[in-house]
Image: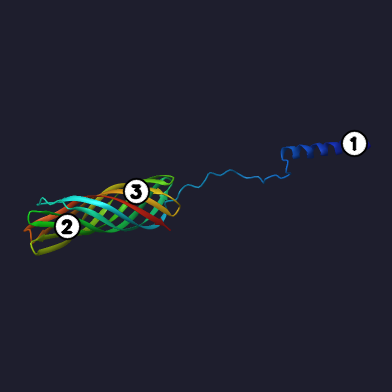
Amino acid sequence: MRIQFTVAIALVLIGVTSAQAADPYGYRAPYTVEQPLNGYSWAGPYVGGNIGYAWGDVSQNRAEPSGLNGGVQGGYNWQFGQFVLGGEVDIQASGASDTFAAWKFSNPWFGTLRGRAGFAMNNILIYGTGGLAFGSVRAQVLNLTETNTTAGWTLGAGAEIGLTQNWSVKAEYLYVSLNENHFMVTGMPNSYDFSVVRFGVNYKF
């Protein structure tokens, strides 16, 4: 009996010594299951601002208005795995203008209402966009000024990079076509087609 008790004590001591050798501090972390890090989320509403440059041409005239523009945008994204779908609206003040002969054309403001579809690689989003465009075209001859508001369409693409879960920056190209309107001061219909390159920042809620 004494021999069996001695053997049992020896086995316990060996087990304790082995455990302490494996963990010299006598502490064992609880069992955990490894989980991958959460991916960047593009889903939800957002607002932001942008600044860019526009250049284009006026139909029935050789004026080529160009200039800086800037404004605000807002939208909402839905995310399905790596695919992101959403909608965005923006409004821009524009300094694009040009004079040819006696006629000066300018584009004081424009805006768009677009859908967006993109592919996300974690915090990088590559997307295409398109939809409705609207804005004003102004014609001036001598002391006569006429401004028409018109609609049209837009198509473009861009890339957005998430800096944090709330803040992102983007670069975007849009082609915008504003439909023809008849101008009394020119005596003919004139439209304005232009390209926009802009950079912006968004805050996602």
Look at label 2 and name its amino acid: Ser
48 vs 17: above or below? below
Question: Which residue shows up at 89% across the image and 37% down it?
Answer: 6
Disc 1 from disc 2: Cα separation = 103 Å
* Residue under pointer 2: 106
Q: Secondary structure at mark 2?
A: strand
Look at label 1 and name its amino acid: Gln
- Neighbor class of circle 1 (other Cα within 10 Å; few <14, some 14-19, many 20+) is few
In this picture, residue 112 sits left or right of residue 75: left
Residue 24 location, x and y as percent? 73, 41
Residue 88 location, x and y as percent? 33, 56
107 vs 84: above or below? below
Quick check: can you spot residue 1?
no
**Pick the front one: 186 or 101:** 101
**Pick the front one: 97 or 77:** 97
- Neighbor class of circle 2 (other Cα within 10 Å; few <14, some 14-19, many 20+) is many
Question: Which residue shows up at 15% across the image and 60% down it?
Answer: 138
Query: Which quarter of the image is occupied by the C terminus?
Result: bottom left
* Residue under pointer 3: 117
Of circles 3 and 2, the one toward us is: 2
Disc 3 from disc 2: Cα separation = 32 Å
Q: Quadrant of residue 14?
A: top right
Look at label 3 and name its amino acid: Ala
* Residue under pointer 1: 4
**Which residue reaches farthest right?**
2
Disc 1, disc 2: CB below 8 Å? no
Residue 121 location, x and y as percent? 42, 43
Question: Which residue shows up at 87% across the image and 35% down it?
Answer: 7
Task: Specify which label sits upstream in the sequence, 3 or 1.
Answer: 1
